[in-house]
Amino acid sequence: MKEKLKNLRYIVILFIVAIIVSIPLFWKNLDFYHDDGVQHIYRAISTQENMNNFQSTAVLPRLQNGFGYSWDLFYGPLSSFSIAVIGSIFSNINVGYKIVMFLGMFLSGISMYSLVRKITDDKNVGMLSGILYMTMPYHLTDLYLRNSAGEYLSFIFIPIVFLGLYNLFHENKKEWLLTVGAVRTYNNS
């Protein structure tokens, strides 16, 4: 029981750091429509409309002046589906975008914490690496400047790939599915 509480303590610390790093996301004057942001917002809007109309999301008919466009040829569906679903819950696609980006920050910290904790067997080093991973300049650049939702969410899966490889070669050889699932998701995000 004490072990679970200690793990929870580290996760809460990572959650608080993710909140602090994500505060600018929720400023009213933050413009996330520049660079790739406008593409991901419109893609999420079209995905949300297709889901509401029970249509396939392979071709988004709203794009390209009503001719449709298969955006999933270039980006995986993880970012658009998650933004669309959370945007539907809150009835605002912009809020959905911000929440998904916050969750991406938090989950990337958790995945790095899990990887380093497993390799070093030290929770403090794992927490520090999770914090450093969340605050790396390129990570923050993708979040606040480039607005590249697909690439940004892929930061969740990179440590999971390495954790699966570590398990495959050093620990439990049955956990190789973790690597395959993360690589598959990473390639689709």
Image: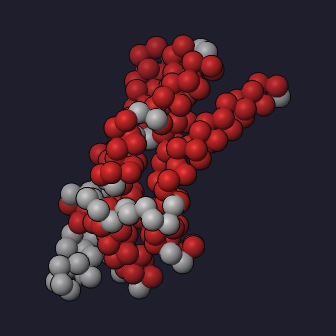
Q: Residue at x 41, y 16 (%)?
A: 169
State whether residue 93 is above or below residue 78: below
Q: Residue at x 20, y 60 (%)?
A: 73
For the rendered model, the colour scheme is secondary structure
State whether residue 50 is above or below residue 6: below
Q: Residue at x 25, y 81 (%)?
A: 61
Q: Position of residue 43 (x, y in %)?
A: 32, 69
Q: Position of residue 150 (x, y in %)?
A: 33, 52
Identify the image quadrant of residue 168: top left
Identify the image quadrant of residue 183: top left
Q: Nearer the viewer, residue 165 or 70?
A: 70
Q: Nearer the viewer, residue 140 or 88?
A: 140
**Residue at the far right in the pictured view:** 1
Q: Residue at x 59, y 39 (%)?
A: 17
User: Does any portion of residue 26 appear in the rendered image?
Assistant: yes
68 horizontally vs 54: left or right: left
User: Does any portion of residue 178 appear in the rendered image?
Assistant: no
Q: Position of residue 84 (x, y in %)?
A: 45, 69
Identify the image quadrant of residue 110: top right
Q: Nearer the viewer, residue 32 or 42?
A: 32
Q: Position of residue 133 (x, y in %)?
A: 46, 31
145 horizontally vs 16: left or right: left
- Name the quadrant of the N terminus: top right
